[in-house]
Amino acid sequence: MDFLSQLLRGIAFVPALVNGIESLFGNKSGAEKKDAAMSFLQNALATVDAVSAREIVDPEKFRQGISQIIDGTVQCLNASTWCKHACTTTQPSA
């Protein structure tokens, strides 16, 4: 499987991950929930990377990109009917 296919599969997984993190850590801050999501994604991506023998040449830029995907997903979910009237998911300030 090529890199683009793996990346798109990972992106497709983010909304479910964010929803699961919200369910597990609903009483935590947005930053804590994002850290949990990032940790989970980094471990999942490390496993996929090891299995596919693909190297990420700039891990920090890759991490920043994944962070932006999580922020965007939270923003989309908060703007949708998924988020009830008093949604507690917030994005950390930059």
Image (tube, rainbow, N blue to C red):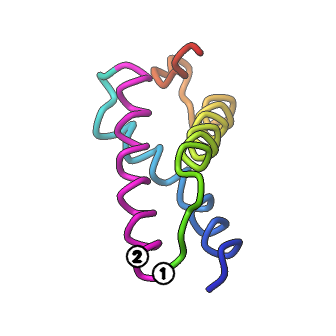
> Which residue is labeled 2 in the image?
50
Give the image quarter of residue 54. bottom right
Q: Quadrant of residue 43?
A: bottom left
36 and 15: which one is in front? 36
**Residue name at image x 56 percent, y 39 percent:** 67
Label 2 secondary element: helix
| Whether residue 38 is situated above or below residue 57 in the rendered picture | above
Q: Residue at x 55, y 50 (%)?
A: 15
Residue appearing at x 49%, y 82% in the figure:
52
Element on which disc 1 rests? loop
Mark 1 to mark 2 CA distance (whole Å): 5 Å
Q: Which residue is most to the top?
A: 93
In the rendered image, residue 92, in percent from the top left (x then y), is placed at 51, 18
Please tell me whether residue 30 is drawn above or below residue 19 in the rendered image.
above
Q: Residue at x 61, y 29 (%)?
A: 78
Q: Is residue 43 above or below residue 83?
A: below
Height in image: 86 above or below 18?
above
Q: Which mark is residue 53?
A: 1
Q: Are marks 1 and 2 in contact (CB under 8 Å)?
A: yes
Q: Main secondary structure of the magenta part?
A: helix
Q: Quadrant of the N terminus?
A: bottom right
Magenta-span inclusion, residue 12: no
Q: Is residue 54 left or right of 65 when viewed as pictured? A: left
What percent of the width, then of the height, locates residue 28? 31, 22
Looking at the rendered structure, the kind of residue marked 1 is Ala
Check disc 2 and give the amino acid type.
Answer: Ala
Mark 1 neighbour density, 10 Å: few (under 14) some (14–19) many (20 or more): few
Q: Tell which residue pokes out farthest to the bottom in this image.
A: 1
In the rendered structure, the answer to whether residue 58 lies left or right of residue 36 reads right
Range of magenta residues: 29-52
Residue 23 - label: none
